[in-house]
Every structure is written in structure tokens, then in C-alpha cells.
Image: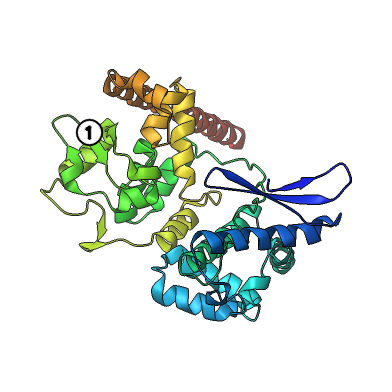
């Protein structure tokens, strides 16, 4: 924190910059007023540090203009453009120098009043907005990001549905051919949707039965290797090619699977799973199979600390192969249970029909 309260109740602004602490009394016991003075103190120090005159900044610029400039010059990513559809109508006529944490709280309340949303959804709006303000600082439009130390709301932890083997068989049967392959890959590798859709044939080593993930979402895009299950190996071997995308539709890259996925669920007549639930299903099945946490994290591409990497680096692949073997063994056991249940139901129905026929006679 940069704001400190003295025993007298008066707040002081303490800003650390280049290893030096700059102190300034706000002269007030009102915390909100002190926060405003604290921000101005930081802006003055930044101006002095970079030798930028205050008049070079433009805090009176409307957010609509800032957003337009960001879209034109800021190399905006697709998700940032998408979030602007929500934030722009609300903040368009506000001066960017007046947008602060208090206004963000009002925006959060406004979003929740319009529609039932999770905190995670609104957090994405706020994160995109904060990124735009960082860009404004880099461009010299603002001296500091007023949302820099904004704490995001913690989302409530929700139970993630785990797909049963019975539902898996139904959704695969109900899916289009190109989606069937993607579903099997997700369930047998734990790969993210984006990783699956960008996977290329060059990254599969059929002799070692390994798929290399090179477009990871994790920081730095760490490469990881995932041993292929027998099912996924057979599926890919039948269509093996030298190069190009593995999963395509009519030989074209696939950008979205939302419509195809919804159609598969509807035909399968099962609960409304999200495609990302296949990844959590993969993880849950590994847990059921007795695979330890660090090996699961490696397979799924979760960030791990240096010590954990060092610990498993020399036996990493054997451990991963063993994990996939356990996964296949667990699934085979579930299939056998399912077959017994079906046989039991068939036997019961046969008995009922025989008894009914006997009574009729």
C-alpha cells in the first residue's frame, strides 16, 4: 500500500520509486480524499521521473476516443475487442481521468443488475479495461494507470461437471465426424480447445506414440509431451499425414465448435456440458486412476515451480506413460461396469416379458 495512516488519523502518501521512498502528507483524515491526493502524488513523481510535462497528458479525453485509438493503434486482441462491447457503452462519455475504482464498483453493480453473471465474467471486462489504461500510460495519454492496484472480485468456486463414460459414448455417437475426433483428443489428452485446433501433424511422433503441444496457453508457452492412448493413436494413425493441421472441417481450419458441440449434446440427450468440461474430466479420471498431482499438472500444461520441474525431469516421460496407462485401465474398468449394467437391465426385461407371457397364457 502507498497510503499510511498516522496515529493522529491523517493519511500520508508513501510512493516507492527507483528504491527511494517519497513521503507526502495528504493533510486529511478522509480516506477517499487521501486516495485521490495519493494518486496525484504518484502522477507528479512519474512526470518528474520521465521528464514529461503535465500538459502532455490528456486526462480529459473521453473514453470513447481512447477506445477508438486503442483499437486502431494498440494491437487489440480479439477478447479485448469483445469486452469493449460491454465497457464502451457504459464509460464512453466519461473522461478517462475520472474513471477510478469507485466507478468500477458502480459498473460491476450495473452489469449484475442487467443479467445473472459470474464474477469471473465481469473480471474479464475489468482486466480488458485495465489493459487499455496501461496502453494509455505507455502512449503518454495518462501519467499512471488508476486501475493498476485494483483487486478483482474472487469468483465463487463452482462444481465442475465430470462426464461419465456413458455420457461420453452418447455425445461421441451424436457428434459430427470432425467433432468426434476432437472430443476423443480432449478426453484422452486433456488438451485445451485452442491447443487441439492448432495442433499439426509434424508435432506427432508415431514411433514414440507422443503428441507435442507447442501452442500452450501457459506463460511462455511451455512445450509439453503427452503420450497417446491406444484409442487416440489408432484414430490418428488412420489419417496420418506429413504436415498441416490435424483437425479440420472440409480441409479447412476450424475456428469455432460451439454450434457443433451444442448439436451433439442435443442429439445425445444428456446434461449441458461445456467443451472445457472434457479437460476437467480428463483430470478427474487421472485422480480416480491414482495419478499424482505433479504428473497431472505436467500432462495438462499447468505452470509448475522450478523444484518440481527438476524433480521429474529425468523420469518425466516414463511417469507420463504410466499415467496414461492408468487412465486407459480405469476407462476400461468403467466400460466393463457399464456393460454389466446393460446386461443386467436386458436380463430383467427378458424375465419380465417371460413372466407376462406366462400369465397371459
Q: In front: 228, or 134?
A: 134
Residue located at (48% from left, 79% from top): 68
Q: Residue furthest right?
A: 8
Q: Quadrant of the C terminus?
A: top right
Q: Quadrant of the N terminus?
A: top right
| Percent position of residue 219, x then y | 40, 44
Residue located at (65% from left, 75% from top): 90
Element type at mark 1: strand
| Percent position of residue 193, x then y | 38, 50
| Percent position of residue 279, x then y | 44, 41
Q: In front: 95, or 178?
A: 95
| For residue 235, above or below residue 339 | below
Question: Where is residue 126, by image quadrant?
Answer: bottom right
Residue 333: in sight, yes or no?
no
Q: Which residue is mark 1?
A: 210
Callout 1: 10 Å neighbours few (<14), some, many (20+)?
some
Q: How many marks?
A: 1
| Percent position of residue 132, x then y | 51, 66
Q: Going by the image, does 315 lie left or right of 77?
A: left
Colour mode?
A: rainbow
Q: Residue furthest left?
A: 242
Residue 194: in sight, yes or no?
yes
| For residue 315, above or below residue 101 | above
Q: In front: 30, or 70?
A: 30
| For residue 357, above or below residue 149 | above
Q: Going by the image, does 34 lie left or right of 22?
A: right
Q: Going by the image, does 222 lie left or right of 348?
A: left
Amino acid at each position: 500500500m502507498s497510503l499510511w495512516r498516522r496515529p493522529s488519523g491523517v493519511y500520508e502518501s508513501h510512493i516507492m520509486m527507483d528504491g527511494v521512498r517519497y513521503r507526502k502528507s495528504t493533510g486529511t483524515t478522509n480516506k477517499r480524499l487521501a486516495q485521490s491526493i495519493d494518486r496525484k502524488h504518484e502522477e507528479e513523481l512519474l512526470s518528474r521521473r520521465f521528464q514529461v510535462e503535465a500538459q502532455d497528458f490528456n486526462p480529459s479525453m473521453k473514453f470513447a476516443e481512447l477506445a477508438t485509438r486503442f483499437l486502431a493503434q494498440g494491437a487489440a486482441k480479439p477478447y479485448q475487442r469483445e469486452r469493449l462491447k460491454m465497457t464502451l457503452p457504459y464509460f464512453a462519455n466519461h473522461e478517462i481521468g475520472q474513471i477510478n475504482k469507485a466507478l468500477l464498483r458502480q459498473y460491476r453493480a450495473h452489469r449484475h443488475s442487467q443479467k445473472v453473471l459470474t464474477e469471473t465474467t465481469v473480471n474479464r471486462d475489468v482486466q480488458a479495461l485495465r489493459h487499455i489504461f496501461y496502453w494509455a500510460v505507455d502512449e503518454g495519454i495518462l501519467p499512471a494507470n488508476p486501475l493498476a492496484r485494483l483487486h478483482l472480485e474472487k469468483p465463487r468456486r463452482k462444481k465442475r461437471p465430470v462426464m461419465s463414460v456413458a455420457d461420453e459414448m452418447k455425445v461421441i455417437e451424436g457428434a459430427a465426424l470432425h467433432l468426434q475426433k476432437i472430443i476423443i483428443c480432449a478426453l484422452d489428452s486433456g488438451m485445451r480447445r485452442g491447443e487441439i485446433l492448432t495442433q499439426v501433424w509434424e508435432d506427432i511422433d508415431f514411433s514414440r506414440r507422443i503428441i507435442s503441444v507447442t501452442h500452450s496457453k501457459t506463460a511462455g508457452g511451455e512445450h509439453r509431451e503427452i503420450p497417446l492412448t491406444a484409442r487416440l493413436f489408432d484414430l490418428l494413425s488412420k489419417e496420418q499425414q506429413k504436415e498441416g493441421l490435424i483437425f479440420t472441417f472440409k480441409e479447412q481450419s476450424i475456428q469455432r465448435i460451439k454450434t457443433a458441440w451444442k448439436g451433439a449434446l442435443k442429439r445425445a440427450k444428456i446434461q449441458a456440458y461445456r467443451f472445457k468440461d472434457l479437460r476437467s474430466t480428463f483430470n478427474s479420471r487421472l485422480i480416480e486412476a491414482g495419478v499424482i498431482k505433479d504428473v497431472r499438472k505436467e500432462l495438462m500444461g499447468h505452470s509448475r515451480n522450478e523444484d518440481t520441474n527438476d524433480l521429474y525431469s529425468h523420469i518425466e516421460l516414463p511417469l507420463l506413460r504410466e499415467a496414461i496407462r492408468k487412465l486407459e485401465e480405469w476407462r476400461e474398468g468403467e466400460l466393463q461396469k457399464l456393460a454389466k449394467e446393460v446386461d443386467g437391465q436386458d436380463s430383467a426385461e427378458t424375465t419380465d416379458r417371460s413372466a407376462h407371457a406366462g400369465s397371459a397364457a
